[in-house]
Amino acid sequence: MRRGAPPIVAALALLAALGGCGALRGSPADVATLPDGPYVTEVAVAADHYLTAELEVGGARRRFLIDTGAAFSLIDDDVAASLGLVSVGEQPMIDFSGVRRDVDAVRIPSLRLGSLEVLEVGAAVIDMSGFDATQCEPIAGLIGMNVLRGAIELDVSGGWLRLASSMSLLAARAGGVTIKAYPPSYLLHLPPPTRTLAPTPVTVDTGSPGAITVTKAMARRLATGPRLRRDVLSQSLNSARPRRERHDLFLWPDATLAGLELEGVRVEVAGSATIGLAVLRSFVMRVDREAQTLTFWADPSRPPPRGLEGLGVWIAAEGEAGRVRSVTRGSPASAAGLRLGEPVVSLDGARLAEMTGQARCTALRDLHKKEQVRVGVRRAGAVVEVALTRRTMLAPPR
């Protein structure tokens, strides 16, 4: 595997153009054999950045991403090689920028999620090292909707995922907001919040660590207040060279989204429409694929994040240093003069090169939680320290 390769930032969006219309049905990675009889299993999940679970494959426990926005599963190329998996055909993949690549598909003989054994799991083979660098632990693969069938119950903040062959096997829950899934597909789609010529459903996407994303067409039709612009260095599946992108940020207006009250939650304009982990942390969610419904129970102790505050910068690990991969205009980072693409060599005077790989990764991953930080960047052969103080960039509604 190319462990030094830049992260594939958009790889979690693999299926947007293919999955929704059912074009993946019958493709090499879109298979898995679940038990014929009734089953219920509970799996511990964590959400440090992505939603992950420790599963058993090839006689070993390995960390996988759990992605309700993926039509099929993935496996890291090194893990596939170590398990002796051979190609059973090619699987098309598409990223957020519309770049397509055909990759090998394999069948994982056995995958255990808690007490549930799933056989002959189809998976596309890709380099997952970009996810290692963001999650700060080795990621063996991704579990998509070819495995997450039947009934699903997820409590992100509670740290568990239940899978059952039928909703009747899960304990009854009172109340909740139930929405019809739209259209029927392998992905968990909801009706779009706006009416457009080409409707784009909203995907309930545990593979997205953010809050809400919408397409440009949706953003134009939403009555929103102030907007900020975020400059991003983004990666596509087929190119090692990052490309500059500009994404608008704003707050969700006074309108329900799939029946959920999300006024003031951060929205980013992207290539697809999703409800991500930052929102799903505030709910228990059930998915009944037989009835094609999703039900949400709000937890009053964990309200969705409203408004936008922070440092306005994302720094990704790159070798023994870091690199500025995103700067929000009008943020502390922008006002202090941090530039997109700059190499970062220290945080609060501590040199990144002198940290362990785990410590360096964690420090960069959790940078957004800090109230204040001094970022050391290399400019013209010298190290310049830039002081940042967290502040509100878009105020939530009162």
Image (cartoon, rainbow, N blue to C red):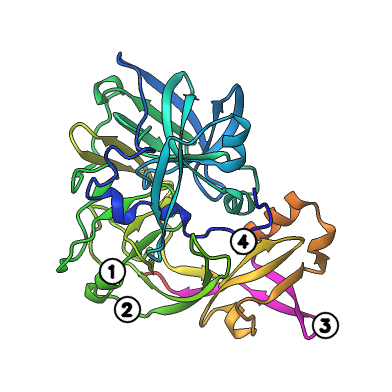
Q: Amino acid at mark 4?
A: Pro
Q: Is 103 located above or below residue 144 in the figure?
A: below
Q: Residue 278 vs residue 368: left or right?
A: left
Q: Secondary structure at mark 3?
A: strand
First to last magenta residue range: 370-394
Disc 3 and disc 4: Cα gap in Å? 25 Å
Residue 392: in magenta span: yes
Residue lying farthest to the top in this orientation: 37
In this view, the residue in front, 320 or 178, is: 320
Disc 4 and disc 1: Cα gap in Å? 36 Å
> Which one is closest to the eye, mark 3 or mark 1?
3
> Which one is closest to the eye, mark 3 or mark 2?
3
Q: Which residue is mark 3?
A: 382
In this view, the residue in front, 91 or 175, is: 91
Q: Residue at x 42, y 23 (%)?
A: 118
| Sequence-first tag of 4 and 1 | 4
Q: Amino acid at mark 2?
A: Gly
Label ID, residue 225: 2
For the residues labelled 4 and 1, say whether their Cβ atoms are less than 8 Å apart.
Answer: no
| Sequence-first tag of 1 and 2 | 2
In this view, the residue in front, 55 or 30, is: 30
Q: Which residue is mark 1?
A: 253
Q: Position of residue 310 (x, y in %)?
A: 55, 69
Residue 220: in magenta span: no
For the residues labelled 1 and 2, say whether their Cβ atoms are less than 8 Å apart.
Answer: yes
Disc 1 and disc 2: Cα gap in Å? 8 Å
Q: Residue at x 36, y 63 (%)?
A: 213
| Sequence-first tag of 3 and 4 | 4
Q: Position of residue 166 (x, y in %)?
A: 26, 23
Q: Amino acid at mark 1?
A: Pro
Q: Is residue 279 visible?
A: no
